[in-house]
Amino acid sequence: MRHLAGIAWAGLAATLAGCGHLVVLHDPLSASEHNDLGVAYEARGDLDLAAREYRRALRLDRRLARARVNLGNVSAREGRWGDAEACYRRALRDQPEDPDALNNLALALVRRGGDLAEAERLARRALARCGQPDSLYRSTLAEVRAARRRGPRPGPAGSGEAPSRPP
């Protein structure tokens, strides 16, 4: 306790002397906690802060598929469907049966004019793995099927809306 008080006094003295920089040498948050903080920022609409927290989570745990999916969702909301696709594909390498990654990759393929047959396979897998007839996944499958009936469209498309809810 005495040691902590000494550190506090040293910090106060440095601040008063004009050296008001505090350096944190240890990040107290876990990868999961950074992901959760990113979800909170994303819910507020602070996409830059959300992406920063998802990247911090991934620095701590490179295989945290949930953070990778969430980072992809930020890219998708910003209309960067190629970046979103890359995030979802990487998440599936780490967690091949993640229904959100499957669903969102299918949607990214549709929005950027990618392989619609692959998109339909992914959407079907997502729907089969979600454990219940989730309307979001059914909606994605319906969108993929509609895109296949229309035929491929060149170039990126889409509204930039979030493809899937965070955890």
Image: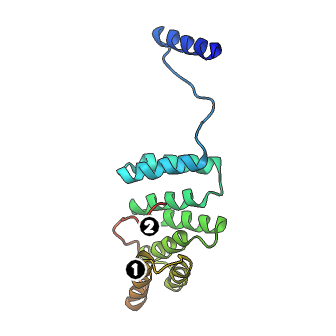
Q: Nearer the viewer, residue 83 or 99?
A: 99
Task: From this view, report whether residue 22 is shown above or below residue 44.
Answer: above
Q: Position of residue 132 (x, y in %)?
A: 49, 79
Quadrant containing the N terminus is top right
The answer to whether 36 appears left or right of 7 in the picture is left
Query: For the point 53% across and 22% down, which residue is it?
Result: 22
Query: For the point 64% across and 47% down, which residue is it?
Result: 60
Q: Amino acid at mark 1?
A: Ser
State which quadrant residue 94 falls in: bottom right
Q: Residue furthest left?
A: 159
Q: Which residue is mark 1?
A: 139
Q: Position of residue 150 (x, y in %)?
A: 37, 89
Q: Nearer the viewer, residue 122 or 7?
A: 7
Q: Position of residue 156 (x, y in %)?
A: 40, 71
Disc ID at residue 112: none
User: In whole angstroms, how far apart are the C-alphas of marks 2 and 1?
Assistant: 11 Å
Query: For the point 45% across and 74% down, which residue is it?
Result: 107
Q: Secondary structure at mark 2?
A: loop
Q: Secondary structure at mark 1?
A: helix
Task: From this view, report whether residue 51 is shown above or below residue 18.
Answer: below
Q: Amino acid at mark 2?
A: Ser
Q: Which residue is mark 2?
A: 164
Query: For the point 36% across and 50% down, which residue is it?
Result: 44
